[in-house]
Image (cartoon, rainbow, N blue to C red):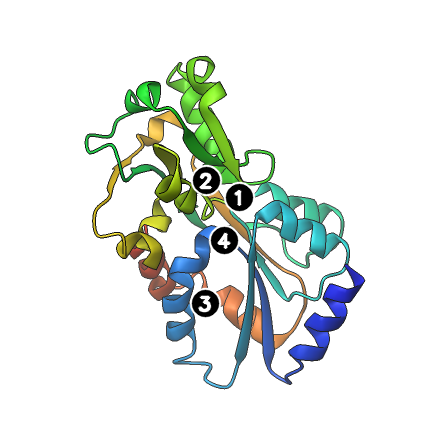
Amino acid sequence: MRLFFIIFLSTFVFAKTLYIAASSNISYAMKDLINEYKKQYKNTYIKIIYASSGKLTAQILHNAPYDIFLSANMKYPEVLYKNKKALTKPKVFARGLISLFSVKYDNLSIKSLLTAKQIAIANPKFAPYGKAAIEMMKNAKIYNKIKDKLIYSETVTGVIPYVINSADIGIIAKSSLYSKKIKNLGKYYYKDVNISLYSPINQGVVLLTNKKEARNFYNFLFTKKAKNIFKRYGYLE
């Protein structure tokens, strides 16, 4: 951990650098968000570290030098706020959705999970999208029938290569459908999961430092332009 901090600090020392810790599901929308943000703040250099929300929270609790944290749920920002690692109370900036994804099943539905041999999901211990997948299965009353078929990736984005290489079906963040890896497949299938089967995935943000660049980006996340970008990438407003 100490070596990580040394490399982190020595490699990216800029006067106007913004260090963002972000859940991996946000990565697909981030390019457009940054491009829009830089129309107003051209001189800000932005460094983004993507990982599971749980792993990023652990790093921040051990004093990782991030300025702002974008989580896949509200739980982890709340942990940081309670531990006085965040300057602001957690605030919802977007709501995530889950979808079924496959390169084998062309008529996807919840029932497809019953016939699949392997189902890939993000690890529910660390990834909110994995937790939503489990909740969906339980509410659909199929969890006990398919739990032995589940294979886990560390993050929700890691579900995609599992499905491409081995799993019959994956449960992914809807935003993942906009990844280059999926678009380059040419042929794939997906089905949005009815939101009545799982709790809305409220994605939370907190400020970790009082840097001007961090506050500017924090405020930008709640503008109409940012909201439209999130909507375009598979999130609820």
Q: Residues within 10 Å of mark 4 (few under 14, many from 20)?
A: many
Distance of label 4 from label 2 (alpha carbons): 14 Å
Q: Are marks 1 and 2 in contact (CB under 8 Å)?
A: yes
Distance of label 1 from label 3 (alpha carbons): 19 Å
- Percent x, y of residue 23: 52, 53
> What residue is shown at x 54% (from left), y 80% (from top)?
45
Most distant residue in the right direction: 2
Q: Disc 3 designates what residue?
A: 220
Residue 73's label in the rendered image is 1
Most distant residue in the front direction: 165
> What residue is shown at x 26% (from left), y 35% (from top)?
104
Residue 97's label in the rendered image is none
Q: Is residue 68 left or right of residue 159?
A: right
Residue 24's label in the rendered image is 4
Residue 111 visible in the current orientation = yes
Amino acid, disc 2: Ile
Residue 201's label in the rendered image is 2
Q: Secondary structure at mark 4?
A: helix
Q: Is residue 39 left or right of residue 2?
A: left
Q: Nearer the viewer, mark 4 or mark 2?
A: 4
Of callouts 4 and 2, the N-terminal one: 4
Q: Are marks 4 and 1 in contact (CB under 8 Å)?
A: no
Amino acid, disc 3: Phe
Q: Is residue 196 left or right of residue 25?
A: left
Q: Are marks 1 and 3 in contact (CB under 8 Å)?
A: no
Q: Are marks 4 and 3 in contact (CB under 8 Å)?
A: no
Distance of label 3 from label 2 (alpha carbons): 21 Å
Of callouts 1 and 2, the N-terminal one: 1
> Looking at the figure, which quarter contains the N terminus?
bottom right
Of callouts 1 and 3, the N-terminal one: 1
Q: Residues within 10 Å of mark 2 (few under 14, many from 20)?
A: many
Q: Nearer the viewer, mark 4 or mark 3?
A: 4
